[in-house]
Image (spheres, grey):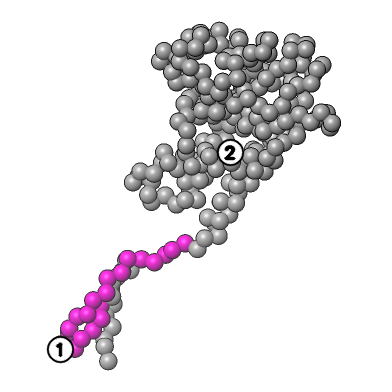
Amino acid sequence: MEDVYKEEDFYKENGWPTEHFTFCNYRFPQGMDPEWGEDYDTFILITNALYPYIRLSRKRGQCQSPCGLATVVAPDNTYAKKSDEERDKECPKLVWGFAAFFIADLRYDNEQEDFVPIKGKDRLVREYYDKYLQIYLQNHNGLKYSKISKEQMELDFLESHEAIIRKLWEKSTPLKKYTMLYEYAIDAESEYETFLKTRKMEIQKKMDDTPKNHTMPMTIRTITQNGEKSVYIENNTGGVTIELS
């Protein structure tokens, strides 16, 4: 897995670590751009952030901010040397979390005049969920977690994950100026949250339906009483001697 960083950690050490970019697959048709007219907008997914987010880049001649069409910002790049405020003004952040992951999977179909998913939402939901579940399990694999069932571990993950994705979506209000994309993102976010709720109920039902193991620790040994061999059995309720015939 590629090294990932918290959003606030980028560019802290002389331009390192730098954001890694994936340029999204669609281009806005003329007239759809709400702010810059004939210059189209380019959405850029930051792929090495712990939780992905999308920056907006404006076309300027044959170049695109922040670093042409390169996928990595060099630490000595002028963009990397800017302040956080300058970078955010040049390439504003629009959307975070699952909604960003979903939007990056879209392309614009000119014949349909609509956005079309490349992978499909169901696949995206599983990929996104599995990624963060595995990160959680890797970070909670010490001995103190060894007695916690897999089901309980996943429930604990869901508790924290739901809170995180809700906050990420609440940050994503800048996307509202792209009305159609924002509406699609709302639907995708809702479907992801529904998946999480359904998954939680499935795990809880599985745990409730699993028979509880009431077996108690037991000591069994052969003893000799009055020259006769017997079997002595002891558990939490006491002991009993069974004579051997």
Q: Give residue 55's position: percent from left, percent from top.
A: 61, 19
| Alpha carbon separation for disc pair 1 and 2 | 70 Å
The amino acid marked with disc number 1 is: Gly
Q: Residue at x 50, y 45 (%)?
A: 154
* Mark drawn on residue 128: 2
Estimate how packed mark 1 is, as few (under 14), some (14 to 19) or many (20 or more) residues with alpha carbons within 10 Å.
Answer: few
Residue range (magenta):
212-232
User: Could you say which is closer to the camera, residue 202 or residue 125?
Assistant: 125
Q: Are marks 1 and 2 in contact (CB under 8 Å)?
A: no
Relative depth, front residue between 89 and 16:
16
Q: Which of 76 and 1 lies nearest the eye of the viewer?
A: 76
Assess disc 2: are there few (<14), some (14-19) or many (≥20) residues with their C-alpha within 10 Å of its C-alpha: some
Residue 150 lies, in percent from the top left, at 47, 51
Which mark lies nearer to you, 1 or 2? 2
Q: Would residue 236 appear left or right of 97 to someone viewing this image?
A: left
Q: Residue at coordinates 47% horizontally, 29% vertically from top-left?
A: 4
The numbered dot on residue 227 is: 1
Q: Secondary structure at mark 1?
A: loop
In the image, is residue 227 part of the stretch drawn in magenta?
yes
